[in-house]
Amino acid sequence: MIMFGFFAAIFIARRDGEAMGFDGVSVADLGILMLILGILGARLLAVLTDGLLMDFVHLCTDSTLVEAVDTQVRICQENSDCGFEYLCNLDVREEVLAGTKASMCYPPTDCLAALKFWQGGLTFYGGLLLAVPGGLWFAKRRKMGGLKTADLLAPSLMLGLALGRVGCFLNGCCYGAQTEGPLGVQFPGHAFGRHPTQLYESVFAFSLFIVLRHVLRQRTRGEGELFGYLLCFYGIFRVAIEWLRDDKRGGLAMLSTSQLISIPLIAIGGWLIFRARRGASPSKDEIGTIKY
């Protein structure tokens, strides 16, 4: 779903870009670059901030210290009891019986686990924070205009996120807090229904895609303004939705990593909007509608 989201975003961006006078090939090249940087950044931030960094270290040094999160058994006699590729550690039986250790099963040694993003562990903000600077550098080299290109890509970024979050839902990650409401979904490994925060965000991202592309784009008055709206609206939403999230994602004090990142992005977005509005002159058609 992430790949589908990326290519849908590139398709829309190229189509919109050609209508706005961009070179379609350059837009497609930019999309591929941002795809690569986005995956790298998304994985890097997940590894560093999701609270599992030491697990990746232990997977290379002593994998018996890592919990076998997907196993359904506590006690095992042989490796096949654990399922998947997990191994059975007979030396910790007493610890498991005493309740100090969750299971006798543990994953095999894997020094490359931190690089295996296809096994899960990607963050949208990590991808954004690496892909956007890379995209701006590319736009400058191709003389596309940095802020103008950012405005072009803003709606497509939300389309890609909307589809990617569907993948999160299907994977069972990024779930929300426990709820008994009608929207609750029982994910594998959880005894009670939880908020499908992945779908909440998918609906919001798709709605923001529509608003940015079909409403606000026609009303912007300066370069960078549309991208500023993206940062502000998504940042505010992300701060709010994080209070419903209940998966491991790292943080500081009461704020999650994504909330900490959202705050400066909202400020940057507000500055871009202010800058675009202050620097733009009203058109002849607008002068008659301005109220002093």
Image (spheres, rainbow, N blue to C red):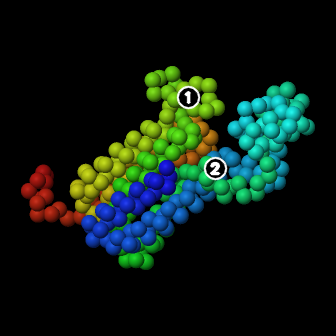
Q: Is residue 102 visible?
A: yes
Relative image position of residue 234 (x, y in whole percent): 41, 48
Q: How many marks?
A: 2
The image quarter in which residue 69 lies: top right
Q: Which residue is mark 1?
A: 186
* Residue in the image at 91% along x and 37% along y: 91
Contact between labelled residues 2 and 1, with CB atoms less than 8 Å apart: no
Residue 120 x %, y %: 61, 48
Question: Which one is nearer the viewer's eye here, 178 or 235?
Answer: 178
Which residue is painted at 27% across and 71% down in the image? 21
Whether residue 238 sits left or right of residue 288 in the image: it is right
Check the image and report above or below for 180 versus 147: above
Name the residue type under label 2. Answer: Gln
- Whether residue 101 is visible to the viewer of this picture, yes or no, is no
Q: Amino acid at mark 1?
A: Gln
The mark nearer the N terminus, 1 or 2, is 2
Looking at this rendering, what residue extends furthest in the front direction?
A: 80
Tell whether 132 sits left or right of 188. Answer: left
Q: Which residue is mark 2?
A: 119
Residue under the point 37% across and 77% down: 143
Q: Position of residue 26 (x, y in %)?
A: 39, 73
In the depicted view, which residue is nearer to us: 76 or 41? Answer: 76
Front-most of 178 and 68?
68
Q: For marks 1 and 2, give the CA distance.
A: 21 Å
Q: Secondary structure at mark 2?
A: helix
Residue 16 spot, x, y in % from top left: 30, 62
